[in-house]
Amino acid sequence: MAAWGLCAGCLLGWSSPALAATTPQEKTSKKTSKTAASVEPQAIAALERMGDFLRCQRTFEVTAKTTTDAILDTGQKVQFAGTADIRARRPDRLRVDSATDLNQRQYFYDGKHFTVNGPGTGFYASFKAPPTLEKTLEAAEQRYGVELPLVDLFYWGTDKASVKQIKSAVYVGPATVEGVATDQYAFRQGDVDWQVWIEKGDRPVPRKFVVTSVQEPSQPQHVATLDWNLKPRFDDASFNFVPPGDAHRIAFEDARQRAGRSTPNRSR
């Protein structure tokens, strides 16, 4: 079974009642102009506003309900459900509790160490971490190949958001996500299409993401619906990992060392 990788980018076909009286030629012309690759300034501006707002939140908790498609060896698409609870306190605290139909993971950052724990496995791994949340997430991904659920929430509005790589960006229209009024936007970037629903008003937080892999014929998707608490109260103990008595610590493998072993030694 192969699960598809997530990046970011969905250009949706849509029509307006105002087009109902147009001729077939006019419909074709309008459809072509709307569905052609374009980057609407208001869609990019919405992402930037969302990123600015997220970066200003010093403390927050977000709970996500997710579904992720995977492709079986037979080519059939199946779906797995999951949840993720993210608690963050900038500049140097983070905890993520993630559970899916396939596994459970916990991630702790207490300002000094970053730890990944596998509940039920009896194993955990930890490394000495940089003094900021952003640098720690970067080290976890680049040095140890660890990417947290919804890690993009910490990158919006920065160079890592890769807004310049977006090939198409459109405003789809108003929508409601679990009773919350939002604006829906669709993007194309690399080998994925993606959509985001951003809450209306003075809290422009993302309420829903849909990421579609366009490389696979079945176009598998990852969907996340988010619920936000922007005024949570955390104590330091929330971010500290205390290993169970029967847990065993294992070492992280540095990706640079792994890459070095995979490179043939051509010296003679």
Image: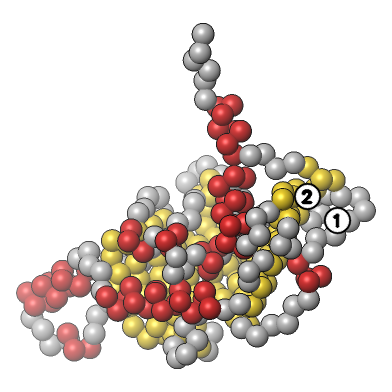
Q: What residue sits 61% from the left and 33% below the top?
A: 257
Amino acid at pointer 1:
Pro
Mark 2–mark 1 distance (CA, rounded to whole Å):
8 Å
Residue 178 quadrant? bottom right
Is there CB contact under 8 Å for labels 2 and 1? yes
Q: Residues within 10 Å of mark 1 (few under 14, many from 20)?
A: few
Observer-nearest residue: 195 or 237?
237
Q: Is residue 117 above or below residue 95?
A: above
Percent across and percent down for residue 61 are 65, 76
Q: Is residue 42 above or below residue 96?
A: below
Going from the N terminus, do you reach mark 2 or mark 1 first? 2
Residue 131 quadrant? bottom right
In the image, taking residue 40 as reference, residue 129 lies left or right, namely right
Q: Is residue 115 above or below residue 253?
A: below
Per the rendering, the mark at residue 124 is 2
The answer to whether any part of residue 209 appears in the image is yes
Residue lying at the far right of the rendered structure: 245
Q: What residue sits 15% from the left and 69% below the top?
A: 32
Q: Please name the residue that numbered disc 1 is placed on.
A: 243
Amino acid at pointer 2:
Tyr
- How has the structure been colored for display? secondary structure
The answer to whether any part of residue 227 appears in the image is no
